[in-house]
Image (cartoon, grey):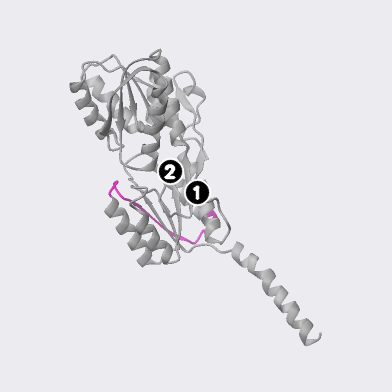
């Protein structure tokens, strides 16, 4: 073979080898930080991310941490991930915008960042439930059950994109019913059962009659239901977002004021986000806009056919 021909063949071989090498590129260290590990929703969410990493990179070291909805704590966790040499971070942010400096720092260190369930400014990829839709269909159901008239409350939550979007969707739905009156929409139920219980106690003391309650997630709705039960307030109906096992059980029992929940699939959502983040890590182009997954309303009428979080994968 002539020298020039040999060089051309070698160059062609080298170029052909690049995509193959990129296709095999996987992280050796992965960090996962989520809003809290105290909410059952995060069990399948974390599992979806971990299982997807395990399939692509069986030898990867994966660290999972909860931030307890504390921005400073989550920023410190990201700093620790950077210091420990992680190559991929999957984040369920506690504040969509305020977490941006921490993400910028991670990306400056060459780390790929994937956001799941809630947005995180600066992340390479984002996959979320269509939370505006989730809030809209839950609150439209409440309004329809009230025949378009009544006094309602919205129990809000932490300033994360999923909660903000759900409340926005709920308000959009209620706006279509002139005779629906929102008594309160700014109380933070901490996205937890205890928080929903505490806020609902205050609302029940403040308002002698409430026709409906929208909880920003299912733990909040369950807490509100418990508070109403303890104070023997029977007049209201309640809706949430998640399609959580506890709400499914409550709907099946018939012994609850909860009438509906906009379902999510946390496992599939996290798996999709992690697949995209791994592709970005390999250098493959990914959508710049968040990928939104539609939700369906779970009610007493269809709960028997609902495939929940605890279904076999």
Nearer-the-camera pick, 40 or 109? 109
Over which residues does the magenta segment extend? 55-70
Quarter of the image where the N terminus is located: bottom right
Task: Residue 89: give x, y in percent of width and height.
Answer: 43, 57
SS type, badge 1: helix
SS type, badge 2: loop
* Vertical position of residue 30 compared to residue 227: above or below: below
Q: Residue under label 2, please give it.
A: 117
Q: Residue furthest bottom?
A: 3
Number of numbered discs visible in the structure rendering: 2
Q: Quadrant of residue 188?
A: top left
Nearer-the-camera pick, 120 or 295? 120
Q: Quadrant of residue 207?
A: top left
Residue 64 has which mark?
none
* Vertical position of residue 15 compared to residue 69: above or below: below
Q: Residue under label 1, please give it.
A: 273
Task: Residue 216: give x, y in percent of width and height.
Answer: 35, 32
Q: Let me know if residue 58 is in the magenta part.
A: yes
């Amino acid at each position: 073979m002539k020298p020039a021909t040999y060089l051309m063949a070698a160059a062609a071989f080298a170029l052909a080898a690049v995509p193959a090498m990129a296709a095999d590129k996987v992280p050796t260290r992965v960090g996962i930080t989520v809003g809290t590990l105290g909410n059952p929703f995060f069990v399948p969410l974390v599992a979806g991310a971990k299982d997807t990493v395990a399939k692509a990179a069986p030898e990867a070291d994966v660290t999972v941490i909860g931030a307890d909805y504390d921005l400073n704590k989550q920023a410190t966790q990201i700093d620790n991930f950077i210091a420990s040499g992680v190559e991929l971070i999957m984040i369920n942010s506690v504040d969509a915008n305020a977490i941006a400096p921490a993400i910028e720092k991670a990306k400056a260190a060459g780390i790929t960042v994937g956001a799941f369930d809630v947005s995180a400014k600066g992340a390479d990829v984002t996959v979320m439930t269509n939370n505006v839709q989730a809030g809209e269909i839950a609150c439209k159901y409440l309004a329809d059950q009230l025949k378009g008239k009544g006094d309602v409350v919205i129990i809000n939550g932490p300033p994360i994109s999923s909660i903000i979007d759900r409340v926005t969707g709920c308000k959009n739905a209620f706006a279509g019913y002139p005779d629906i009156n929102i008594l309160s929409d700014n109380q933070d139920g901490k996205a937890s059962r205890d928080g929903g219980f505490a806020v609902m106690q205050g609302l029940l003391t403040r308002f002698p009659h409430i026709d409906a309650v929208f909880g920003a997630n299912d733990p909040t709705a369950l807490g509100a239901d418990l508070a109403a039960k303890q104070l023997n307030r029977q007049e209201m109906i309640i809706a949430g977002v998640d399609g959580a096992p506890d709400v499914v059980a409550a709907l099946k029992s018939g012994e609850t004021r909860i009438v509906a929940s906009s379902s999510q699939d946390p496992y599939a959502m996290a798996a999709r986000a992690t697949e995209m983040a791994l592709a970005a890590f390999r250098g493959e182009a990914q959508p710049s806009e968040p990928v939104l997954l539609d939700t369906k309303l779970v009610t007493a009428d269809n709960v028997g056919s609902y495939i929940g979080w605890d279904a076999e994968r």
